[in-house]
Amino acid sequence: MPPARKRTRSYDPVRIRAAVLAQFGHVRQAVGTLTAEQLALPTRIGDWTVRELAAHIALAFGAVAAALDGPEPAKADAALLDWPLSTDGCAGAPDEGPPVAACASRDLPALYGRTAEAVGAALAGGPAERLVRTRAGGMRLADHLVTRAVELVVRTDDLADATGLDLPYERQALAASVRLLADAFAVKAPGGSVELRIPPYAVVQCVEGPRHTRGTPANVVETDPLTWIRLATGRQAWAAAREAARVSASGERSDLSALLPLMGRGPALMA
């Protein structure tokens, strides 16, 4: 019998809405301090510079306002739990390049200011159950904002990596990102032989094999939130994370290297 489909975790739409706005605010503040030299630095995302990365963050977040301004889809045919798995292979979407290149040459603080205003106004009038059109299909606004939390957390980490800045993470945005990626991993690798722990936000059972029922699990993987996000999005390799003691893994089934990354790591996560 095939494993039962994992029930989608619920997220508080009010807290997620506040978290994504606040996380964009953190990025906006950081981008406003960057010098011309910092904006010209390379990033770990293809051949993007920091300037292009910053432009992409604003464009991706601004798409929320555009989605709410557009017509409402007839149905919700994109499930939140499927979203991380649907991003693999779409990272190089052809319509991502020109807008980023064009916006990267603009006044970034002004772009961020307009984006924050537009998204804030759109969300103020957008009910959680309102459907929006995304690349994955029609999706509830509440669910779409969880995907935007993942996008913002991942891109905040990309920006920190490129610039060396110590950027803050909104707790609700980080928690939602960790939980969604952990739950999606359990869908990709269903089973109960491995316990994946990402304290303090998530614990999931995954990987085919003997199911743990009581006592200490035979196979345990534990890591911190940002390391999990980097592993899930291909920004850190399993072996490198183990060598750096960022991951502890015990048991014969605890090597997850063949199952990672979960998402594509190219220029654009699916909007």
Image (cartoon, rainbow, N blue to C red):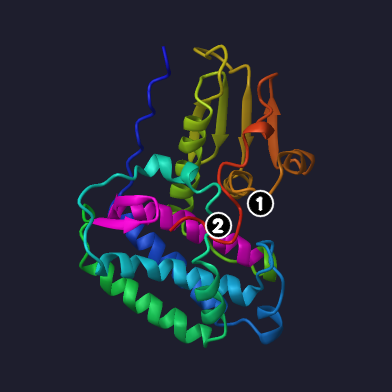
Q: Is residue 6 above or below residue 42?
A: above
Q: Residue at left 59%, top 74%?
A: 52
Q: Which mark is residue 205?
A: none
Residue 221 picture quarter: top right
Three-letter amino acid code at disc 2?
Val
In the picture as drawn, the residue positioned furthest to the front comes out as 94
Residue 173 on image: x %, y %: 44, 55
Q: Going by the image, does 170 lie left or right of 251?
A: left
Q: Are marks 1 and 2 in contact (CB under 8 Å)?
A: yes
- Which residue is pictured at 51% across the width and 77% down the height? 29
Gap between marks 1 and 2, in whole Å? 9 Å
| Part of the protein shown in magenta | 131-160
Question: Residue tagged by mark 1?
Answer: 235
Is residue 137 one of those drawn in magenta?
yes
Q: Which residue is at 61% across, 57% downward?
A: 266
User: What residue would you read off at disc 2?
Assistant: 154
The secondary element bearing badge 2 is classed as helix
Secondary structure that dominates the magenta span: helix
Q: Secondary structure at mark 1?
A: loop
Q: Amino acid at mark 1?
A: Arg
Return the residue nearer the eye: 96 or 58: 96
Q: Earlier in the sequence, mark 1 or mark 2?
A: 2
Residue density around tag 2, few if under 14, some if 14–19, many if 20 or more, within 10 Å? many
> Looking at the picture, does residue 110 appear above or below residue 135?
below
Front in this rendered view, residue 62 or 226: 62
Quadrant showing the C terminus: bottom left
The percent coordinates of residue 235 (x first, y second) are 66, 51
